Image: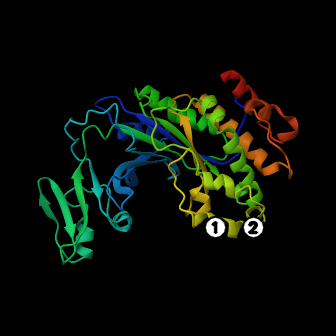
Amino acid sequence: MIKPLNWKIGFEIELLAPRGASRQDLADAIARKFGGYSKRCFYLQSEPSAVPGKPVFENLVLGFDVYTAAHQFVVKCVDDLTIRHDLDRGAEGREGWYRILSDDVRFLRLIMARCDPAADKHSVLAPIAELFKTRLRVENGIVRVADIMSSPIALVAPLPGERERPCELITPPIEAQHFSRLKELLDTATELGFSVPHEAAIHMHFDAERLCNTEVFCRLIQVLQKYHTQIRNAVGTNINCVRLGKLPNWLFKVTKKKEFKNLNWADAREYLADRGLSKYCDFNIMNFVYQVPGKSTFEVRLFPGSLDAREVVENAHQFETILNWCVNASKGNRLPANLTVFLNSEDKLINSSHGNAVRWFNKRF
């Protein structure tokens, strides 16, 4: 019996299609189970860059949105550029697949707003060329668009070998029946022969509404600092996963200061936003600090990849316990040295999933 989760959570689960298949196959299979349909979409992906002065490289990849027959969104199936180990990079790119690149993320957002992801690579940027009163140019299989002064705007390039195989399942925020909804998605992937990639991780986006309070936020950072290594060991963080790491030391110091704790949330958020946070760490606080539209979440990025919905939900229970403590603890509550003691401390857990969290930890140790 899986105890229900009581927190709104969005899940990002990295999978890999068997050779010869693609994320479109999974999107179509999920759509059939819901009696619905899948629709090609653009998805903005970033990757660290080695170019001086440009820390992140942005591009648009092809994904698929899945809907029910009643046009309700089910899940998004997209590429994840960190998945590389299991791919044959020398393989020929799949016909009809491409990616769009630009040196300005604002152009990519414009393309998402004006261009049709169902279009082929030779015509997809035609609306942008028309907007800038120029023509598309094709050279060595690459389609380019520039402005009237020949300043580059964007280009369409063939997809590198087997880049159609990675599939990150991105769910909408789930408020109830988390286990059954995830099981339906992951069972479908298993039936098609999808596997867990070498670098796989699962990211969980916990709704941050209850965390947008300076006192609660400081407790959260305190917990993450104290139990970081123990949490990593307990969940079995994938050592091959990239874009992980510790929160900055200055954040731990600041959230212990009385002056910061006394700030209202708007002022605290403004202070934090000015310090240059990064999402590439085990715990991403950027979304609710920067108030990202439609994504005010606390993202936990250190969970290992899995096709087991039960394991995914058990990990979510563990963090629900931690977040509930942060929200409900009284002033002056001190943290025990050990995570096991923390999870077992009745006076520190006003939480419906307490028993489940304790069983989760004991099972792993």
Secondary structure state at the residue bearing disc 2: loop
Can residue 112 be seen in the rendering of this structure?
yes
What amino acid is labelled 1 in the image? Tyr
**353 relative to 176 in the view: left or right:** right
Is 263 or 179 nearer to us in this picture? 263
Mark number for residue 19? none
Can residue 1 be seen in the rendering of this structure?
no
In the picture, the quarter occupied by the N terminus is top right
Relative to 107, residue 328 above or below: above
Is 119 or 88 nearer to us in this picture? 88
Relative to 321, residue 265 above or below: below
**325 relative to 53 in the view: left or right:** right
**138 relative to 8 in the view: left or right:** left
Which residue bears the numbered disc 1? 271
What amino acid is labelled 2 in the image? Leu
Q: Kindly indicate the quadrant of the structure image that contains residue 310.
A: top right
Relative to 93, residue 219 above or below: below
Report the Cα–Cα distance between label 2 and label 1: 10 Å
Q: Badge 1 local density, few (<14 within 10 Å), some, or many (20+)?
A: few
Relative to 137, residue 363 above or below: above
Numbered disc total: 2
> Is label 2 in contact with label 1 (beta carbons under 8 Å)?
yes
Which residue bears the numbered disc 2? 263
